[in-house]
Amino acid sequence: MSDVPPTLTAAITAGGQSRRFGTDKAAALLHGRPLLTHVAGALAAFPERVLVAPPGRYALPGWRAVPDTRPGEGPLAGLEAALAAAPPGWVAFVGVDLPGLTPAYWAALVAASAGVPPGVLSVQALDDSGRAQPLGALYHTALRPRVTALLDAGERRLRQAAPPEAVRTVDLVPLGLSPDLLRNVNTPTDLEQLMESKR
Ligand SMILES: Nc1nc2c(ncn2[C@@H]2O[C@H](COP(=O)(O)OP(=O)(O)OP(=O)(O)O)[C@@H](O)[C@H]2O)c(=O)[nH]1
Ligand SMILES: [Mg+2]
């Protein structure tokens, strides 16, 4: 069965506390729709869709709810749960606070994952300062033992999930995509600024 393409999985990590936002930012409205709905909409074409969140917190039709392996331990722990829940292959991993990501953004990352050497286990877009973005990125399920070992050792930074040599970066600009897509919402002010910029 080695000629069957591996399954693409979309995973939204939504187990955060929104401390900086003040209320649950997944439910905050942008252009009349919750941030969670924006994020999910961009990933609707993925054949597998999982939502890593506390049981019962959100109802997202078409998405399989998966509990955290380590509740409250942050997005790196959310990635561990996502990689455990996904069939072997690439996982598009995103938070609730990246409402600007589009199907074209994800298609660019998926295209960049095709034919990478076996050592490449993550595909990450470059932001407007040229830094690879670990949230809103692809991770291969082969990273799962590494992520578990990192968490066991006390690491909590998502950026550590893949070592630099295992990351394929994607420059969005030559693809006609704006790094502005990566603007994320941590505070109410961040959301207000997104509302002012047109979609
Ligand atoms: N599954 C899971 N997701 C998490 C966890 N902590 C944060 N996230 C998610 O990771 C994404 C980015 O995290 P943050 O921007 O730090 O969100 P947050 O932790 O809710 O907000 P702050 O409390 O302000 O840091 C969001 O989608 C969060 O819901 C967690 O423990 N488990
Ligand atoms: Mg946080």
Image: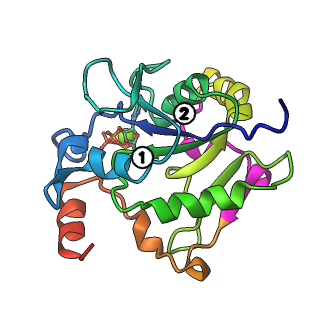
Given the image, on which type of amino acid does mark 2 rest? Leu
Given the image, on which type of amino acid does mark 1 rest? Ala
Which residue is located at x 19 percent, y 42 percent? 27
- In front: mark 1 or mark 2? 1
The residue labelled by disc 2 is: 79
User: Is 165 colored magenta in this rendering?
Assistant: yes
Does the rendering let one see residue 50?
yes
Q: Earlier in the sequence, mark 1 or mark 2?
A: 1
Q: Which residues are magenta?
A: 155-169
Which residue is located at x 23 percent, y 54 percent? 187
Q: Residues within 10 Å of mark 1 (few under 14, many from 20)?
A: some
Which residue is located at x 79 percent, y 49 percent? 120
**37 lies above or below 180:** above
The residue labelled by disc 1 is: 44
Task: List x then y, in percent, for residue 110.
Answer: 63, 55
Residue 36 appears left or right of 48: left
Which residue is located at x 67 percent, y 60 percent? 111
Secondary-structure class at tag 1: loop
Secondary-structure class at tag 2: helix
User: Is 190 colored magenta in this rendering?
Assistant: no
Front position in the image: 141 or 80: 141
Task: List x then y, in percent, for residue 182.
Answer: 43, 64
